[in-house]
Every structure is written in C-alpha cells, then in structure tokens.
Amino acid sequence: MSEQQITDIIEKYRGRPGAVIHALTEIQHANHWLPREVMHEVADALEVPFSQVMQIASFYKTFSLTPKGKHELHVCTGMTCHLRGGARLMAKVEELTGLKPGETDTDAKFSLEAGSCLGSCSIGPELIVDGKHYGRMTPERAADVLKQYD
Amino acid sequence: MPRLQTTAELETLRAEILAARDPAKPCIAVCGGAACDGLDSAAVASAFAAEIEKQGVAAKVDFRVTGCHGYCNKGPNVLVGPDDVCYFEVKPEDVADVVAGAVKGEVVDRLVYHDPASGEKAVHMSEVPFYKHQMRILTGDIPRIDPTRIEDYLAVGGYSALAKALSKMSSDQVLQEVKKANLRGRGGGGFPAGLKWETTKNAPEKTKYVIVNGHEGESAAFMDRAMLTGNPHRVLEGLIIGAYAIGAQQGYIYTRHDSPSMAKHVTTALEQAKELGLLGKNILGSGFDFEVELHFDVGIFVSGESSALMRSIEGNAPEPRPKYIRTSVSGIWDKPSNLNNVETWANVPEIINRGADWYTSIGSEKSKGTKLVSLSGHVVNSGVVEVPMGTPLRTIVFDIGGGVPEGRAPKAIHFGGAMGGSIPIDMIDAPLDFDGMSKLGAPIGAGGLLVMDEDTDMIEMARYLLDFLVKESCGKCTPCREGMYQMLKILTNIIEGKGRKFDLERLADLTEVTSLGSLCALGKTSSDPLKSMLRYFKPEFEARIAAGSEAK
C-alpha cells in the first residue's frame, strides 16, 4: 500500500478527535498493520495525544502493531466450531504453518489468528483465509486449502 | 430518486414501484447469508445471472441475491417465488434446471427437501419442517428483498410504520404503544424497551442519542447479523421511529467490522434513506430531524456492553464504567443515550403498524412477540430460527432442528454464549421465555442456542468458555480480571487430573465473588455458565476430581 493512500485516509479525518478508531480501522484494513510513524501522523492530524492513539491501537484486537503475513489465516474458535472440533483443526493448522495464534512466519507468508465467532456456525468448523470462508473444514483437508496460497 | 416531502409522496412512490411489478412473475432468490456465502453461494448467484441471460428469459423471471433465508446448513439456499419453492444445496450445475423450471412453473425434484427418515418430500417453504414450525414476522421478508435496494423494502410495505408514526401519532403515543406492547430488549437482559425509551425521553438534556447495538459478540449467535445484513432498512425504520418517540437528533449503528456485506448493506441503506428524505432534515414534512452514523467495533467482546460501546463510539478504548447513573440518562458524551439491539429495533415497525394488541397476542405471559434464535451445535438442522416466545425448547431442537445427528442422544442445551448457561436435556419442555430460562440458569441472552450431544465434556466446555472470557476481559476491575483467571486455573487442573478435594467449594466462592464484585455485565455473568454446570452436572466434576486423585 502506498504512503499516499495512508495520507488520504488520515486527511479524511483531519481535525476529528472522535474518529481515531475510524482512521485506524481503515489503515489496518488497507495496510494490515499500523506502523508507529503512521500512528504519530494520525495523532497529529486528528489532534489527539499519541498516547491515546497507542491505547486504542494496543487495546483492540483488530489492530496489529507488527507487520502481518501476505495471507491471514483465521481458525474460528467460537463455541459451535469448538464443539465440532475446532481445537483439532487449530492444532493441525499450527502444525502445518509452524505458527501459534498471533504469530507471523519469517517469510511473512502466513499470519495465524484464533478468530472469534464470525457467525457461520452452521457450517463450522471454519478456516478463513484472507476473508474467504472454508466451511466444514477437517484437519485432513486443511493442508489442501493452504497449498492454494503462496 | 427525488427527496420525499410528505407521507403521501411516499405512498405514491410505493404505488409506482408495485405497479411496475407483476406479483405472479417467478423470482429466484439466492441466499447470500453468512453460511451460504461460506458455501460459495456467490458462484451459484453468478451462474444464475449468466443462465437467465443464456436462456433469454429475463422478461419471464426475476432474480435477486438476498440475505439469510434461515436454513443455513442446507446452503446454498435458493427460493423460487411466487409460491416459495425451496431448493437446497444448489450448485452452479443445477441452475439451468432451476431457471427452466421457474419459467415453466415446474419443480426440480432432486433439489427439494426430502425427509431423511421417510424420504417424503417437502416442496414449499410452508411444508419444510425447518420452516413450518416457525413464525417469521421479522425474518419473513428477507428472501423477498435485495438488501441493497430500498425499492424492495418499500414494495413489502417498508417505512409505512414511520409514515404512520410521523403523520398520525404524537411522540408520546408512539412511546405508549411500545410500552403497551411490552417489547423487551432482545440483547440479553430482557429489560422493557419502552421504559428505557421513557428514561431517555424524560432526561433533562436536550441532546439525545439512539443506538443500534449490532455488535453481536456472543459466540454462536448469528441472528442479528442475518437481520441487519438481510433487511437493514427494517432496523433503520425502527431506529428512526424510536428517535422520534424519544426526541433524539442523532443515531448510531454500532456493528462488526469483520463482515464486509453487512457494512456494505448498512452503508447503502443509510445513503438511500438520506436520498429519499427518510433521514435528514424535516423527515416526510414532519418537522422531525434525524441523522445516523455507522460505527465499527474493532474486535473485543466487552465493547458490546452498553457503557463500553458508548466509549467506543466516542473514539476511546471500550472500558465499561460503573452504572450508578444509567447510560439512558448519561451515555455518549454524557448525554442521554438509548441503546437497543438489532432485533429489538426490528420489532418496532411491526408494533406501530399492527398495534400493541396484536403484538401482545403473540408470545408467553411476560415475554411477547417472536424471538430470533441461532440454532447450532450438535443438531441436524442449523440456522436462524424465529418462533413465538413461549415455544417449548423441544419444538426448536427436535421439530425445527431435527434432533442430534448420527443417532446420538442429546445431553444439554446451552443458551446465551459465554455468559449464558447449560441445562440438562430433561428440561427440554421448558418454554422459551426471558424469566423462565433465567430461573433455570440458562438465560436466553441474545439467543444463541447450542445443542450438546452425549459425548460433550461439560468440564471442558466450562474451561473453554472461561478461557475465552479471560482473554476478552478489559482488565479494568479486579474481580473479573483475577477471579476468572483463578477459576480457569482450577478447571484446567481438574481436567489435567490434578483436581483437589475443595475445588468445587472454591469455584462456588469465586463465582459468587466475581458476580457480586465486577463492574459490568461481562464480569457479573462471566461465571454463569460454570454456575449452571455446577448446578446440573456436579457429579461429572466430582467424578473427574476423584478419578484424578486415584490416578496419583
């Protein structure tokens, strides 16, 4: 993502202290993480202390303060998925990627997250890659899904 | 479309939309709800668009992508009007037959519902077991609406309740109607919405806010998403009516950031309502001004709690505050703020249109209207269910849900996600009712119903739920932050065979202290699942502790 895009997002919210979450969410969606210098720019433009930007960025789980991999893997850990074998699926994905939830591999290919319930409970357990849902996922099929991403 | 100046202009527009439509023309509705989307209904939808073009039948058959039809595990769902033929598990290779059938008025037999036991088929929505025991007052329109087209909502009578409220009722009359209907909040507490509205209305400040809580952080709850994504205008209409009754000038819709179609549909709905003059200055010539902004939750469970949610709208970290003064008196920027969840708001247009007497004729003695339930877990038919309050759980789990798969026996029913509770299956004849379910120890919460089969390990479930809540606690108050952590530690020990003699007494103490000492609902109810499990499944805990000490 270009610096210009980030600047455009920040400009949209200039002078609006109440819009910190809006600005950070858009940057997170577009850039997949929040570099420190960008958060400084947000603080200056929206006229809030840097400490407040940092508090929000570190509090909400959506925001990442470190770079993310090219592909974001979510294994749903909601109640239904858990009841239907979500933990076994998570163990398999951890084994396949060598990652624990919250980690990114050294090639920055995959980031793994323990996703909260996304409401597709009827087709759980679920593996979600870059927002694409793979329902009724079994540990055996997980490898085939991951192979499609490089 | 031009901005509407009066309620008469709204009715003229509605008449024009209806005149341009032929109610007898077949319409193919492809479900784009969360589960169907996960089963690649998008591929089915594009196959339909291409096939209608290919067969050259665009004049003979309509086509739309809609929100959630309800029968999620049978997706992708396709419904063919006008007489609602239900097709299940439709694949792109099936669409040619469905289109040809729709044009000729024939049914594609292989895609309709067949009873797994008898093989008997059910063709129409009203005959399919999953649907036929429901009363779909809130969700019934979803398959008839493209959520991105306000015309579709107007065609099913949308915004007529708003027109009625603004032109024929005073704000007090609207409030009285909702109070009389005894509409109770669907977000968890079951608090009477009318009383809450009245508190905000009577608060001395001039600036007031109304908010839609569409956070739906409760695990295994997905009905609010289905409602807001599938029929956003209905929720918005309820919100505008509520704002009129309360005297609020500004509304907020607070929802999840991680559902792209929901964000898109709500944004579009707000733009369209503004364009038509259903939002903004002098709505339908009534002199009432009202604006709505969309806010996103960015991923923490506690931000569904009312005071935390309001902190989040202000742009701060969502830490709850003590509610010596309720948020309905002092909420966003310390102004009176009325918060109701998606389903509560969705009920409002119906109450205004059909009246409180009609509304109170549905439901149980103290819980009126219908309730949306997300049915999932170890159950054959899973999805979004709408039944009258007071419906026995047996109807939901067996008649609608089809019981437990693979012939296993059900063991427990869990309601209300991580802050709910579990009851043993022998209580299955209990009615779905706010007060009744609370007394049993499994409060309805927002309405996530989970069926657990005989192999479910209740101690493991209790541990799993606490593990979830420990991670979601905001950490502001000690009883919640530390109390849950200690409970989790004890449960983990029991599971690892390191349970000790007085563990259950210690757990009982901790549940009590955490409930009494925590600031917000998350902390207060965090141990509810554990309490219910200790109440009904204590022998399991005792046996596990005993087995652990024997092994040593």
Image (spheres, rainbow, N blue to C red):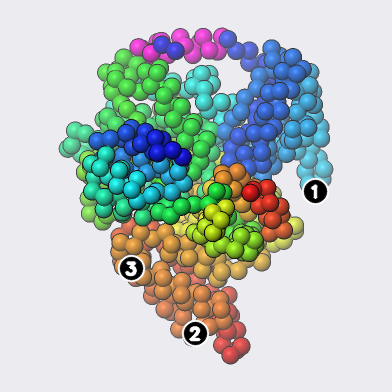
Instruction: Please tell me which of labels 1 and 2 falls first in the chain.
Output: 1
Residue B238: tell me if it is visible: yes
- Indicate which disc residue A53 carries: none
Residue at mark 1: chain: B
Give me the disc on residue B117. Answer: 1
Q: Residue at x 33, y 68 (%)?
A: B479
Viewport quadrant of the C terminus of chain B: bottom right
Secondary structure, mark 1, is loop
CA gap, disc 3 and disc 1:
51 Å
Which residue lies most toward the left here? B204
Label 3 vs label 1, nearer the camera: 3
Examine the image and state in which quarter residue A23 appears: top left
Tell me the element at label 3: helix
Which amino acid type is marked by label 2?
Arg
What residue span does the magenta drawing correspond to? B3-19
Which residue lies under the disc numbered 2?
B500
The N terminus of chain B - image quarter: top left
User: Chief secondary structure of the magenta span?
Assistant: helix
- Residue ID at (64%, 48%): A149
* Closest to the observer, A55 or B206: A55
Q: Residue at x 40, y 54 (%)?
A: A65
**Depth check: B280 or A18 in front?**
A18
State the separation of the CA atoms marked 1 and 2: 47 Å
What's the chain of the residue with tag 2?
B
Q: Which mark is residue B479?
A: 3
